[in-house]
Amino acid sequence: MLEGMKIYWIGGSPCCGKSTISEMLVKEFGFEMYKCDDYLERYIQLGVENGVEIMKKVKSMNLDETWFRDIEEQVEDEFKFYREALKIIVADLEKNYKGKSVLVEGAVILPEFIKNNGIDNSNYICMVPTKEFQIDNYSKREWVKYYLDGCSDTKKAFENWMKRDVEYAKIVKENAKDYGMNVIVVDGSKSIEDNYLRVKKLFGLV
């Protein structure tokens, strides 16, 4: 699986600079970039077409149904969704990126995927924000309020969204550490340039 490619994986949790750092790597080193978030709707559609239950569930829910569920259920569904999405990601990479150096970025890249597929830990970095950094920075993103406009209680929806992502970050961070993988915790004390240099060092690019 994934032979004939040099792949750098940046996973973890949302809102910690993964995308920005990935774009910096692509600009400096000329990697192809596969940004998983750009294809989320496609993963859902393909899953629905193939009868994948979690994709059908995600597709069927409105915003209230999505964000007013029990937090534990939300986190469990996030993992189920990502496990199915990763099957599509692997197929995409094998079809379109043979013989290339690729940077794959997204919260979808689970530590368990890296471990179970024999990917060298040196090619994976798990980036997660602290709770405070996540909530502060998410609240500043203009698109968030527009996305939640359809909710009957936008404040409650945002609170639950943050609770889900905080719990998700906690789990993937613990998993990555248990597997001996590289983890970067972003709390705002270091600049994006500092974190970028650390990523390059962990990937052996400097």
Image (cartoon, helix red, strand yellow):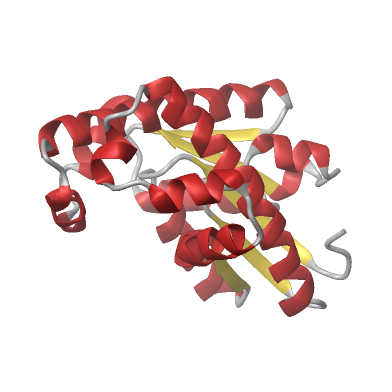
Q: Tell me if residue 188 can be seen.
A: no
Residue at (48%, 45%) from the top-left corner?
A: 57
Name the image quarter holding residue 87.
bottom right
Classify 17 as above or below 187: below
Q: Residue at x 30, y 38 (%)?
A: 65
Q: Position of residue 70 (x, y in %)?
A: 36, 22
Residue at 56% x, 58% y is 48
- Compared to residue 73, the image places residue 139 above or below, namely below
**If the image is split into quadrants, where does the N terminus sit?**
bottom right
User: Horizontally, is 160 left or right of 95 in the view?
Assistant: left
- Residue 18 placement, left or right of 173: left
The quadrant of the rendering that contains the C terminus is bottom right
Q: Quadrant of residue 164?
A: top left
Q: Is residue 132 visible?
A: yes
The x, y position of residue 134, in whole percent, is: 30, 35
Residue 76 left/right relative to 175: left
Where residue 186 appears, as percent x and y from the top left, is 40, 35
Residue 198: quarter of image: top right
Task: Give 3 or 206, whichever is nearer the viewer.
Answer: 3
134 horizontally vs 73: left or right: left
User: Residue 41 at what x, y percent from top left?
Assistant: 46, 63
User: 35 or 76, which is in the foreground?
Assistant: 76
Report the front residue among 85 and 165: 85
